Image (spheres, grey):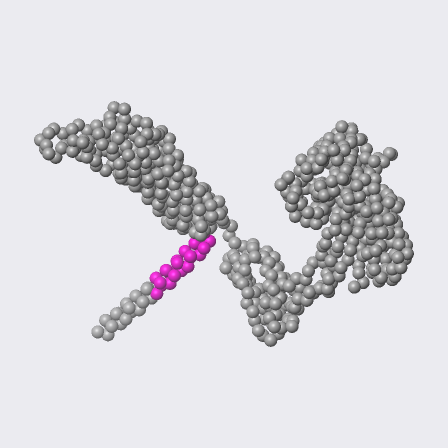
Amino acid sequence: MKNTSIIQNEYHRMKFYSIKNILVMALICLSSLSTLQAQEPQYTKPTWWFGAAVGSNFNFYRGSTQQLNADFTSPTAFHNGFGAGLYLAPNIEYHPADSKFSFMLQAGYDSRTGKFNEVITPCDCPADLSTKLSYITIEPSIRFAPFKNNFYLYGGPRIAFIQDKSFDYQLGKNPNFPLQPENPEIKGDFNNVNNTIISMQIGMGYDIPINSETAKTQWVVSPFVAYQPYFGQNPRSTETWNVSTLRAGAVIKFGQGHRVATPVDGEVQFSVTAPTNVATARKVREVFPIRNYVFFDAGSSEISKRYVLLKKNQVADFKEDQVALNTPANMSGRSERQMIVYYNILNILGDRMGKNPSSTIRLVGSSDKGPDDGRAMAQSIKNYLVSVFSINSNRIAVEGRVKPEVPSEQPGKTRELELLREGDRRVSIESDSPALLIEFQSGPDAPLKPIEIITMEQKANSDSVVFDVAGSKEVFTSWTLKLKDSRGKTQNYGPYSDTKVSIPVKTILGNQPEGDYAVTLTGTTLSGKTVTKETTVHVVPYIAPVVQESIRFSVLYEFNESKSIAIYQKYLTDIVTPKIMNGDTVIITGHTDIIGELDYNQSLSLARANDVKGILEKSTAQAGTKNVSFEIHGYGEDENLAPFENKYPEERFYNRTVVIDIISKK
């Protein structure tokens, strides 16, 4: 007995260890399988799907038919009916990535078979009519997934080509004469049949994945239901028979996805920027001069697309002080946006001439191709003013010449001729009408009357703390923020997926006057890891800046001239000087374009600035204005400090300038 007990115990012990080993091995296998699955490549959803649709058409007949063909007319008209037929078609779908819209095409066999309701003929005999009506159908559809999930709606046209138009007609026995012989069945084809039918359909469906949605080849079955109303579905060109169809079925389809690269965790850069209060914001009221030149592209006598051209129905809404609303589509750079006022020169001119009926102008086109080309340039401007602004053509004279009255290209010049000649291919706007011109000037080189525009030169104080997680879109699926103040109070924000997030200062501070915060960023990487980064930030409340107002005037020069300031002397004395008050600061800055030597342009810009200073110093002294501080700068052709770029001739002309900023002591 003792030996038997020992043997039994040993057996149970071995059995226990065997089961334990089997369980351990199973866990190891499952772990390995899981690891292998995790290492398997992942695939996107397919863009293209191919398959087949199969379904039933439930056909509802309405209307009437009686004359079935030229050989046979039923003694009684048939009306409503019903039937069910097969629908079978190949299916192709195109699904753009991350779009709610996709495209679907089905083309195949489409049965509209059915049987009309039985009718009683004049002989009291029942009559039956059935048809095997069928088509080859082509059905392109737009597919729309409103919730970006597997549910979708679709709709589109149906183009059907007749395949079978046969009918079976059977006249039954008169029930009062049961012994009479059976009437023969009449078979034939309908006549006056529409060979092609164009109608429509709407439907909905739901994609049910059969295998993994991240497998390379993915299979889907899509139950669907669609409705094709009777519009356009009259089988015949005669009588009133029409068909409405309710279709139900399923599409089975497959597609291949693109392999997704295995996520590799990268690095992000985390920074926090708290706003600093700006003590003052400078509000500039600028008297912007309108140069009286319109520049033309080489080889063209049409107005350049750089200029703003209105349509006739837009003229009534045009206002000089709202020219920023009329921005050409191609404007993208700093200089282009700043020159929007100038690029409205033709609209400004047309508006002023409309408001001043006695004003006249002369348009002088200059072209190195000859006077005829210059005249054509001028004529294109005249045509615009006449056709769009309805200016009487008698008020506009045109002229063509080879060189402008004040040319940029001077005899003996051999360098930068291309830029100089671009500046000479222009139409000059000349007038003796004071309503159009800058004050106290006249003649062929007198600019048009300036426009006053108001800008804020300093950006308004920001009232938000900016959290910048550079590289987060490539590394994180999402990230969150935790802010902890000096008292230990914490605030949590997120999750976010954007690279940058702004949180208002007021939200962070609450009722505190200011605060120091420890900021913790927690991000979840594409591989599922958690990454944290820490920094600190000092936050102060937003304080509105003090607005410091100034007024700006500009003096424009012709190429290479500094002494032409003499023509501006009365303007500076009578218009600019009265704006300078006791204790004001006047900053005078000279600029040039990029044509010419660097050192020469530096000296030229300073000479121009000193010319302006000399006139203003003298005129303010004569006016009794005291304690005026003058600052003089000459920046030459420095493109970092230039008012405009130098890409186009009009920009270079506007860079030949002295800018006068009058900053109020207040």
Q: Quadrant of the C terminus?
A: bottom right
Could you tell me which residue is drawn at 66 percent across and 66 percent down? 542
Tally the numbered discs. 0
Q: Is residue 39 highlighted in magenta?
A: yes
Say if residue 327 shows up in the picture.
Answer: no
Quadrant location of residue 231? Answer: top left
Query: Is 244 rendered above or below residue 274?
Result: above
Quadrant location of residue 373? Answer: top right
Instruction: Give the residue furthest to the front.
Output: 358
Residue 104's x, y, as percent?
42, 41
Q: What's the magenta bit mostly, secondary-structure-wise?
A: helix
Position of 403 compared to 310: left or right?
right
Could you tell me which residue is drawn at 83 percent across and 57 percent down? 580
Could you tell me which residue is drawn at 68 percent across and 67 percent down? 543
Q: Quadrant of the N terminus?
A: bottom left
Query: Is 585 rendered above or below residue 451?
Result: below
Look at the image and give the residue range highlighted in magenta. Answer: 20-40
Q: Nearer the viewer, residue 350 or 611?
A: 350
Residue 553's x, y, as percent?
79, 51
Residue 359's x, y, as percent?
76, 40
Residue 552's x, y, as percent?
78, 53
Q: Is residue 458 highlighted in magenta?
A: no
